[in-house]
Amino acid sequence: MKQQIHYTQALPEYQIKFSKVFKGNGKIERKFYEEESLRLQYELVKLQKWIIDNEKRLLVIFEGMDTAGKSSTIKEFNNYLNPREARSVALPKPNSKELGQWYFQRHIKQIPNAGEIVFFDRSWYNRAGIEQVFGFCTQAQHDHFYKQVNGVEEMLVDDGILFFKFYMNISKETQQNRIKDRENDPLKSWKLSKLDYESMEKYAEYEKLRDKMFRLSGTPYAPWCELDANDKKRARLNAIRYLLSNIDYEGKNRHVITGVDEKITKLHNKG
């Protein structure tokens, strides 16, 4: 399966009256979002049934800037899926034993079994970004990661795993505003850490490493789908659309799955 991106205007947000879809700030209205999200949820349930019935394996990686909405997007995917056959993985910092293992080892343990969907909330690409920014790995380890990562991913795909990589991108201004929002909301305060503030100060370094990651690990067999997540809701919808459009599951409603929004999605697959 070679992933492709199909840009289209045949999306509900471009077929309905503008004022019914978009707010004055250009972001989509909640009512429209909830209605379109529900249409996509029906398709995700069909996809999971097909995966279970055919013993397929689906692995989806989410990377992105801090506060870009990785966790909430995974939650959107998982809303109506059978939790016994779909799980989210967010690994903590490696312990002393894991630090002595092959770098990919603890992630490989989480690879989906037959009939299962697994979402990675951050992944082995920590070594491409945050570990390099804060010196949690050496330059030699960072370079060695890039010598191995494409081979690892090619083996996963060659073994029949349906493998998707999403990167959620936001502007520095959006990141600053979301951190302020978390500061002022007691229900979100747990999301904040000292590292979030330090990451905000190193936004430009993250940008350079992000572009390096796209260039070195965006391959034809494991491309990066970059999402403009300044509007989280539009990013979520287009992440689901992209994934569903690239899998020929049984019962797909092709009136619902028509493609993705060119304003929100971009594919990196040069290798």
Image (cartoon, rainbow, N blue to C red):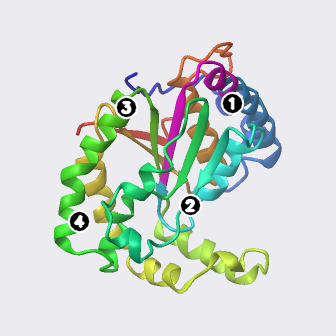
User: In the rendered structure, which disc, 2 or 3, sits on the residue that comes first in sequence?
Assistant: 2
* Tag 4: amino acid: His
Please rate how many residues cluster around mark 4, counting C-alpha atoms within 10 Å: few if below 14, some from 14 to 19, many from 20: some
Q: Residues within 10 Å of mark 1 (few under 14, many from 20)?
A: many
* Residue with the mark numbered 4: 142
Please determine whether, in this image, residue 124 is positioned above or below residue 93.
above
Amino acid under label 3? Val
What is the three-letter code of the residue carrying label 2?
A: Ala
Tell me the residue that label 3 is attached to.
157
| Residue 247 visible | yes
- Residue at 24% x, 41% y: name it: 151
Cβ atoms under marks 4 and 2 closer than 8 Å:
no
Tag in front: 1 or 3: 3
Q: CA distance from mark 1 to mark 3?
A: 21 Å
Q: Earlier in the sequence, mark 4 or mark 2?
A: 2
Q: Which dot marks residue 90?
A: 2
Residue numbers of the magenta segment: 48-62
Give residue 252's quadrant in the image: top right
Toward which corner of the image does residue 180 lie, by quadrant? bottom right
**Mark 4 → mark 3, Cα distance in angstroms:** 23 Å
Residue 172, how many percent across, how many down?
A: 47, 70
